[in-house]
Image: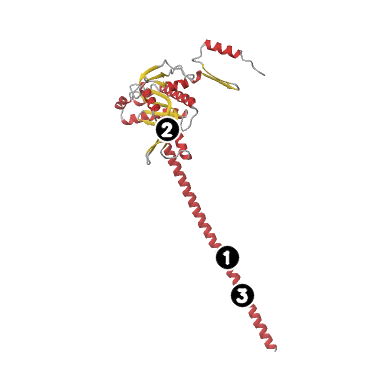
Amino acid sequence: MVKFGVRKHKIMEKTDNEIEISQLKKEVGKLRLESNLRKSLSVQLTMQKKVADEAKAEAQAKTEQLEGISSKLSKYLSPQIHEQIFSGEQSAEIRSNRKKLTVFFSDIVGFTDISDELESEELTSLLNFYLNEMSEISLKYGGTIDKFIGDAIMVFFGDPDSAGIEEDAKLCVEMALEMLQKMDELRGYWGKNFSLKNDLEIRIGINTGFCTVGNFGSDNRLDYTAVGGAVNLASRLEHLALPGSAVVSEDTFMLVSQFFKFKPPEETDVKGFLRKIKHYGLDEQGSSKMSMLSMKGKGFDLTINQQLFSQKELEELKSSLAEINIKD
C-alpha cells in the first residue's frame, strides 16, 4: 500500500509538472506571439511612416510645382484676374456681363518706322522696357491690363474690382498723367540705350461707358477682355490724340472735370459712329493731384481744384462759410 501511494504521489507530481510546463509553454508562446506582433507592428508603423513621409514629400513637391505654375501664369494674366482664378472666385468658362468701365488705350507714335530702323534684338529690348514701365504704373493705380497689341496697351477700370464709376475714371486719368510724365522723364534715354534718333512719344485715349466684360473664346481657349462700342471709342480717341497727349470722351470728362484741367472741347467724325464725337484734351501742365484739396467731415464733403478755382469763387466760398451758424 505504501509503494502504491508513493507511486501515485510521483505520478501526480509528474502530472503537475507537465501541467506547469505546459502552462509555461503557453505563456512563452503568448510572449513570443506578443513579441512577434510588436515587431510586426513596429515594422508596419515604420513602413506607414515611410509612406507618409514620401506622400508628404510628394505633396510638397506638387505644391511647389503648382506655385511655380501659378507664378508663371501670373505673367500672362492681370494680377486681379490671376488672384480671382486661383481663389476660386473666377471660373474658367465662357461667361460675361455688362458693366460700366473706363477704358484706356495707348500706343507709341510712329512705331512702324521705329521697327524698320532697329534690329530685332534692340526692338525687343526697347518694347519690353517700355511695356514694363507702363505696366508698373497701371498696376499702381489698380488698372486691369487687358492686353498688349504690339506697342499698344489696353487697360480698363471697373472690373473685376471697382472703386465706383467716378473713382475708376479718376484713377484712369491719374494713371494716364503719370504715364505721360514718365515719358517726359525718359527723354534722352531712348537714344543712349536703344540708338533711337528721336525720343519715344505716346498718345492716349480714354472713354467711359457700358461694356460686355468676361470670358470670351472657345471651350479650349479663353480670353478675359472687354468688348463693345465704349471700347471701340476709346481706341478711336487714342488715334485722335496728338503725340505726347491724352484725349478723353465727354462721358469721362463729366466724371472727372472737377479733378483735372482740360482743353476746350472738340467735335470730330469718328469711324464707326454716326454722330460727331465730342472729346477733350487733357491739359498735362494744369492737371496735378497736388492741385486737389479735399476735406471731409461730419456734415460736409468738400473737393476743390485749386487750378480751376478763381479768386471770386474763393471769396464767395468764404462768405458762404461765414454765414453758417455753428451749433455747440
Residue 235 drawn at (x, y percent) = 37, 25
Residue beneath disc 3 = 21
The image position of residue 204, as x and y in percent, is 39, 23
User: Is residue 130 visible to the viewer in this orientation of the structure?
Assistant: no
Residue 213 is marked as 2
Dot placed on the residue nearer the N-terminal end, 1 or 3: 3
Which residue is the site of mark 1? 34
Q: Counting other residues with Cα less than 10 Å from the Cα at mark 1, is it few (<14), some (14-19), or many (20 or more)? A: few
Disc 1 to disc 2, C-alpha distance: 70 Å
Figure check: 59 above or below 230: below
Give the amino acid type for the residue marked by disc 3 in the picture. Ile
Residue at (58, 11) in percent of width and height: 319
- What colour scheme does the image use? secondary structure
* Disc 1 element: helix
Q: Position of residue 138 (x, y in %)?
A: 44, 28
Residue 128 lies, in percent from the top left, at: 38, 30
Q: Tell me, yes or no, if residue 127 can be seen here.
A: yes
